[in-house]
Amino acid sequence: MRIFFSIGLLSLLALPAQAAELPGWAYPVNPAPKPPDAVKPIQLPGSTKSYTQAQIDDGFNPPDWYPQDHSAMPDVVAHGRKEANARACALCHLTSGGGHPESAGISGLPAAYIVRQMNEFKSGARKGGRAVAMLPIAKGLNEEDFKAAAEYFSSMKYPVWYKVVEGDTVPKSYLGNGAMRFPEEHGGAEPIGNRIIELPQSDLSAESRDPRTGFIAHVPTGSIKKGEEIVTTGGGKSIRCAICHGAELKGLGEVPPLVGRSPMYIYRQLNDIKIGARAGAWTPLMKAVVDKLDDADMVSIAAYLVSKGQ
Amino acid sequence: MKALIYMAVLGSLAAPAMAAELPGWAYPVAPPPGSPPDNTVQKSLPGSTKTYTAAQINDRFGPPDWYPGDHPSMPDVVAHGKRPSALACALCHLTNGAGHPESAGVAGLPVGYILRQMAEFKSGARKGMRAPIMVQIASALTDDEIKTAAEYFSSMKFPQFYKVVETDMAPKSFVGAGAMRFAAKEGGTEAIGNRIIEIPADEERTEARDPRANHVAYVPTGSVKKGEAIVTTGASGKTIQCAICHGAELKGLGEVPPIIGRSPEYIYRQLNDIKIGTRNGAWTPLMKAVVANLTDEDMVAVAAYLVSKGP
């Protein structure tokens, strides 16, 4: 009898902990891929290019809608390394480095920081729930590739990419191809809970990997103000971010900028550091930062940080 | 006439700024080399089976290894450097990485930190007044050689090296061969002023590059307590609490180095070099706000407190 009790208790403990560790809103799981349409031409305003969805989703030749918007892309950014199964950076991070909520925004990060992250994906120091996509890429590329890609993305300013909307409800949404989130067409609204829901400003733009059109971050009512207190004062439970991330949270040395970027991504980093799934050479400095933060705190911090980039 | 006035003003601005920037007590200048060291008298140390002449002790490519049992086996580059320009690490840093005030203690530092420092000497990011010899060495070694040296020193615990004495009057001292400071032969004391005077507890042992020898750090009366307030509280916003990046016990955090129990002169030099811009590596920006409002007195106090906490 005692054994059954113990097993019962253990399983009760196991499930909630896992659900709390990797909330689905922040760690979207890729649904089974559907083959993309290879016939219908797609175009975007202001671009002379035309691509089918199949071409848009070509991991080794993603679309370059506005070549005039960026300097010449290194080969690894535009095409990856097919023989190594390393997909092109521009596929998920876009030619502008603005990224998507399910990937990451990487333009305007210090080059050395980017190179370090690539090495940490390679070494396993970064093994968070969404890091798996980077694993074959980091393993398939060499240090020169890391540097070339890092210098390219680092040299570009991060775009104004997010509109931020505080609310109690959020459009119902679903995960499409590649774990991109879209609003349900006639879905209505649902309570936002303790989540940040990032939806495209234009579904077509997101699906097309448009580097000029960004996202809307729906954040819980009151979260921005709550986040401001934690970020700017430590809130009695953390450390002021500006000490290492710079007076305006735009980065300091190799420490990356935090403002105006995907709040889901920020949440994932805080959480991955807290649960030990992100454990690189400089992560120890973040431990005291996240140690006493709960889920609501991390959502608030992310909401405040993205709101500063509008 | 105006040109003369401008020049006079510029001239008077330049000199005091430089004197304040590089205080001699922290940035010792080696005297011109005297006669070559003696190569006849065999010296020995308590507990060691070895004997060396002064010439052997100062052999840049074969410094003494007094207590081989005290340390793991030394990589070749640590024990012998690489001719012609990479002096053996153990010469100045000693076989246990304890170092001397005029060099640096390197034992127990994170490997990544040591690698970065060597790269920064090579790149010019570290160009403080005491850096040139390290620039020469770092430029001559390969990445692999530097890595083995870093792993060697990082693996050892920094020894208890300093006795700290607060005082108003420090022993009179002079800078001798190799920029090592010694108590004046004629003895006597002088006002300590705003300085930290580090001299050997036993001159002969320090001259022999004895890794078990200790130093005494004379610090101004009251500086330890003053430093404690700055280090542990940030002194009401004047600076930032060191523990945030250097670890709760200031024993380091990730690649950020430990700072307690090590040469206070060396700590002062880093704070000052960062302040005046001669230490300017990839992570130095995080130290800028730390030093921006610190005065010379503050930096002496910080160094005094940190060395008093022991390794």
Image: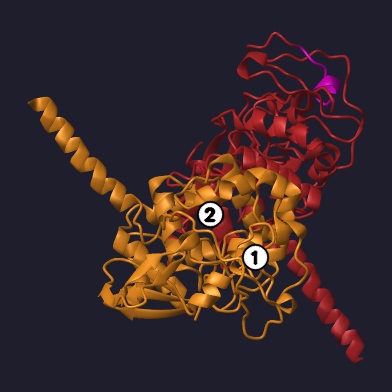
Tell me what hue chain B is rendered in: red
Q: Which residue appears at 29% of the width and 78% of the height?
A: A188
From the rendered image, report the letter of the chain displayed in orange. Answer: A
CA distance for labels 1 and 2: 65 Å
For the residues labelled 1 and 2, say whether their Cβ atoms are less than 8 Å apart.
Answer: no
Decide whether residue B52 is among the magenta residues. yes
Q: From the image, tell me which residue sits under label 1.
A: A55
Question: x, y percentage for residue A250?
Answer: 56, 70
Decide whether residue A10 is among the magenta residues. no
Q: Which mark is residue B301?
A: 2
Q: Chain of mark 1?
A: A
Judge whether B56 appears above or below B155 on screen: above
Q: Which mark is residue B151?
A: none
Question: x, y percentage for residue A216?
Answer: 44, 77
Callout 1 environment at 10 Å: few (<14), some (14 to 19), or many (20+)? many
- Residue A289 in which image quadrant: bottom left
Q: Secondary structure at mark 2?
A: helix
Q: Secondary structure at mark 1?
A: helix
- Residue B263 in which image quadrant: top right
Q: Residue furthest front?
A: A39
Q: Which residue appears at 73% of the width and 75% of the height?
A: A67
